[in-house]
Image (cartoon, helix red, strand yellow):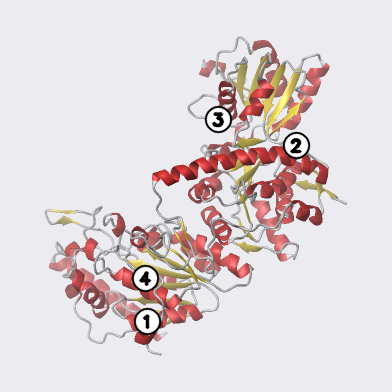
Amino acid sequence: MAEVKVINGNMAAAIGARLCRPDIIAAYPITPQTPIVEYLADFVTGGLLDSSVSEVESELSAMSVVTGASLAGSRVFTATASQGLSLMYEPYFRASTLRLPVVMAVANREMISPQTLWGGPQDSLTVRDAGWLQIYVEDNQEILDTLIMAYRIAEDKNVLLPINVCFDGFYLSHMSERVEIPEQAQVDDFLPKYVPEHIILDPSRPMAVDPLTNGYLLTEYRLKHMLAQQNALKLLESLDGEFKERFGRNYGGAVEEYLCEDADYILVTMGSMTGVSKDCVDAAREAGKKIGLLKIRMVRPFPSDRVAAVLKGRKAYGVIDRNVSFGWNTGIIYEEICASMNRAGQFVPNIPFIAGLGGEDITAAHIDYAIDEIINHAADAVKNATVWLNREDKGKEDTK
Amino acid sequence: MNVIDKLAIYEDQISPGISACVGCNVELTLRTCMKVLGPDTIFAIPPGCMGGVGVVGWDKKSGAKTPVFFPLLDNVASMLAGIKLHYEHIGRHVNVVAFAGDGASVDAGMQCLSGAAERGDKLIYICYDNEGYMNTGYQRSGSTTKGAWTSTTPVINGKGGKKQNKKDFPMIMAMHDLPYMATMSPAYIPDMVRKLEKAMAVESGLVYLHVYNPCLTGWGCTSDESIEACRLSVETNFAPLYEVENGSFQMSVDVKNPKPVREFIRKFKKFRHLTDEDIDALQELTDRKIDRLRKLCTL
């Protein structure tokens, strides 16, 4: 039987990683991810986890140690946030282009400046084009479950790519809630042992890894890398059912559709804001407003076909981003959705929202306001005029 | 078995035909190190001369015969630490070795190297110090000697050159309290072989080996003077050979009557513009440092 505990998001991430039995762990503490490093150290010292841990001097080394260990054949785990992820960028990009199935939890934190340490996915969204897979989750149970799925996806022979499991700092990392912890045997059944068959550094199979490579071959690498990302998307979709059978929970695959079936209007969310948003959608439904919610889980690759299929033919939709896309005057997910709709040859009136930057609260009042805007004003909204929910004037004065 | 026999018998782990400059003493250093380390070795060649000349090659026609990898310039020691951790985790012995230039060790990779040294990651880290970014056209590094011409410290109308002293990196690494730290020179092959064997016998912790490799192309010196230049660096005490075992310093080659530093300096175009005063200052610095080293050897 699964054990039920009340734990914070960092503990859920640490237990999720523990259940996957990584051989090598390297992580450097950074707020709000720090407790993950401490919990894992406790597990190893206390004999609950048979991993070798490198107490690295920086995130650059954390990413580099797991890269080296993965290249030699280990299952690896690391975790970071914000500035730490930035410091990792050089080996981060390379882990994906080397096709190493590294699993990394990200306790999402806003990027400086100005100096900040509160939650928000600006950190990992900014590096979304570095070739990793990225999944964003809503609550602590989903952190734990998605980490287990993440190893299965990353190590699949048709994928072989690193993956980020991202959750909002503080809102999840430091918030405690009920989490079911599966039995070790259940996870072992779901997740086979990792046996590398592509590149490896081993004197019994000598090979030169990553010599200077011409553009025509690099083109092949890029093409296959992107196909592998698409394979990961398909796998996440198909694993949803298998996970439900084995563990009793599922999340909808690449996106979750909530009350979408008969909805005229759709609110698009991601991460921890989704919980309060679902409550607001419920309340709006009771008031006779036909709105549904689309939660984005996978950002890389972006599930564009499924997103467009959900949004097409609706009266209007709105997207709440807890991040910005510099240069577009909107959030990043909004732009991803515009691209998806354009590719599908669809246009639906819409409104971009930005809320919760620097860890600001996204309240039920903000969501209610957004829902009413979508229903009442999407058709006449100025194209791409972002509504800044945390500002009194909703940003109208400065951005017109 | 003596050193000559060993080097005759041991298999060359680097294939023939890598494209190093004619007379390159780094190639000799690499071949010697890899012969002694043997086939049960994984090594990393970060961007730099030995990467540029094709040591990270496709197969046995070009490059290395043991597993080899191109790490990033700044993460050599951590990447290797991960590899070593894997082999320790599965209980299998493999030599895990860096062969990195001074740019990847003294400058960009210093943080990772210092971290690995402090943690005691069981690596053999060999730095070939040719005093700058020689592979990309002779730019200065933190290991360039004061006064030297480089492409980023140009000399125009007799003025210019590097303004700062060279970082004393072997000493910095020795102060990490390593189980073993040594300086080596391709002009002293028996000494090099002995030190490599000692490095391989170390049971825990990081071993740092620093090789002073005057660069013929970048410093301006002819191929037939390659080994002579290396020998002069030792005979002038400019790059003394010593080793530090668990904190205990020892001279490996005790130069009783050192030649003037001028004899070494005058070998290279990159120092041609130096005035007598400049060279006197380098002599003074050399004397001061060898005095300090000798004192450390008495402790």
Residue A4 vertical position relative to residue A347 in the rendered view, above or below: below
Q: Mark 4 or mark 3, which is nearer to you?
A: 4
Same-subunit check for callouts 2 and 3 = yes
Identify residue type, mark 4.
Answer: Leu
> Which element carries disc 4, helix, strand or loop?
helix
Q: Give the Cα separation between the discs numbered 4 and 3.
A: 50 Å
| Residue A221 appears in the rendering | yes
Q: Which one is nearer the viewer's eye here, A179 or A398?
A: A179
Q: Give the Cα separation between the discs numbered 2 and 3.
A: 26 Å
Q: Position of residue B95 (x, y in %)?
A: 51, 72
Q: Mark 2 or mark 3, which is nearer to you?
A: 2
Residue A101 vertical position relative to residue B126 in the rendered view, above or below: above
- Report which residue position mark 3 lands on: A324
Task: Check the image and name the residue furthest to the front.
Answer: B61
- Report which residue position mark 4 lands on: B30
Q: Give the Cα separation between the discs numbered 2 and 1.
A: 63 Å
Task: Check the image and name the residue furthest to the bottom.
Answer: B1
- Report which residue position mark 2 lands on: A251
Same-subunit check for callouts 4 and 1 = yes
Check residue B7 in the rendering and tell me which mark sits there, or answer none. 1
| Residue B295 appears in the rendering | no
